[in-house]
Amino acid sequence: MLDRRRFIGSMAAFATTLLTRLRASAAVKQKGTLPSRGELVLRNAYVMTMDPEVGEIPGGDVHIRNGVIVAVGKGLKAPGAAVLNGQRMIVLPGLVDTHWHMWNTLLRSFAGERPNQGYFPLTTAFGKIMTPDDMYHGVRLAAAEALHSGVTTVHDFCHNARSRAHAEADIRALQEAGLRARWSYGWPQGLADTQISNMADVEGLHRDWANFSNDGLLSMGFAWRGMFRNTSLPPEVYRSEFDIARRLGIPISAHVGSSEEARGQIAAHAKENLLGKDVQIVHAVSASPVEIEMLAKAGSPVSVSPGTEMRIGYGFPKVGEFLAAGVRLGVSVDNTVLGGDANLFGLLKTIRNIENAKSHDEFKMSARRALELGTIEGARSLGIEDRVGSLKPGKRADVIMISTAHLNMGVFTDPAHMLVESAQAENVDTVIVDGRVLKRGGRLTSLSVDRVLEDAQGSLDAMRKRANWT
Ligand SMILES: [Zn+2]
């Protein structure tokens, strides 16, 4: 009798252990929905390596193993590798975005026609009532669109980290999407200019970053308000924030000289020694020739977002001037509240057209130069050009394939011109990030578009009620 009871007891304990293990493995499986890396070869495509030595390879191959590019060339031997047919495809390094408030993609095309419904009142009102779940749904919508559009690296400028939970929800959406990203902690919407950001949370996240880095795909930065936001910030606010981020050794990013009216802001930062290789300046539309020299001398990279800068009336980006001065330059989506979509090819087209228009010169900026801004130059401006931005053996495998078998891409002429002048997100056939195929045959492989859209709509509908915003 005793033996039997003991036997039943041990069986029950065994069953409990088994159940726990099953639950644990289900949880792991649910969390790790990303495809495995494996071995691939992209065959017989028009390969634009964006590497000045290798150049372009018509009928070229790219061989990828365990997340790394092992070879680029013609007729590569890759026995056992899965073959991705590159016929009628252009192969390019994944596009690099350098500043994007991904959370507010939940408010896409929502900025109204009157001042009280404009971008800032809208994003502040909604930003203030967002839950961690809302953040997650906004960032996941943005991340899904990034992959859909061939953007493999983003700089997620999260200026709505209302709590550690909000920050973690934002990061989780990036992890699950499998994107490469710099994630920058930013002040919560509505924070008074006289109040310091929650630097304890910045330090905490930095300390725990190994848990968030997703195998090195995600790095951490600090989204700083700079010396000016709505008003001039007190030095005890901007200085302490800057000093803490510097001490942690994480890159800093700030909107400075955003509009033509914001003249002198860059010089003010230079005077206080608040520029540097680790300080990315966003917009810089008001930069004077002297200020452009200051940026170049300090090594501060600049991010321009012509789509939103023009839509909001900031002015035209000074791309030609920055490049001539040797400033490291990246292109950015900024936000889709004003910009609408995240088609980076469209932004490159805009940049080139502005340059040509301003200089009354059909040949001022070449399509290839524009493509460099969206790939290798963007990577350089984020300090990750040793890993991504061009197709070269040893680099991480962030690669996209653009199909030319579409009405807006026919006929095949000059691939660089076709990409900059014609390409849409729908033409992006395949997206590989760190060796993982995340879009194939025009469809995302790890995210359900229906689910992403449904959850985002649910979040926005509930927020509109809470905000009493019609
Ligand atoms: Zn911005």
Image (cartoon, rainbow, N blue to C red):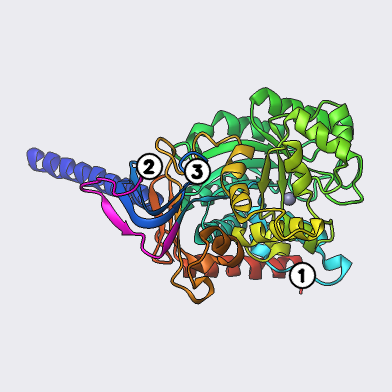
Q: Are marks 3 and 2 in contact (CB under 8 Å)?
A: no
Check disc 3 and report the residue beneath it: 390
Q: Is label 3 or label 2 in front?
A: 3
Real-space CA distance between mark 1 and mark 3, rounded to the nearest whole angstrom: 48 Å
Quadrant of the image occupied by residue 241 = top right
Position of residue 67 relative to residue 453, above or below, is above
Residue type indicated by callout 2 = Gly
Real-space CA distance between mark 1 and mark 2, rounded to the nearest whole angstrom: 47 Å
Residue type indicated by callout 3 = Ser
The image position of residue 271, as x and y in percent, is 88, 27
Q: Which structural element holds mark 2? A: loop
Q: Is label 1 or label 2 in front?
A: 2
Q: Which structural element holds mark 3? A: loop
Mark number displayed over residue 468:
1
Quarter in which the N terminus is drawn: top left
Q: Earlier in the sequence, mark 1 or mark 3?
A: 3
Check disc 2 and report the residue beneath it: 67
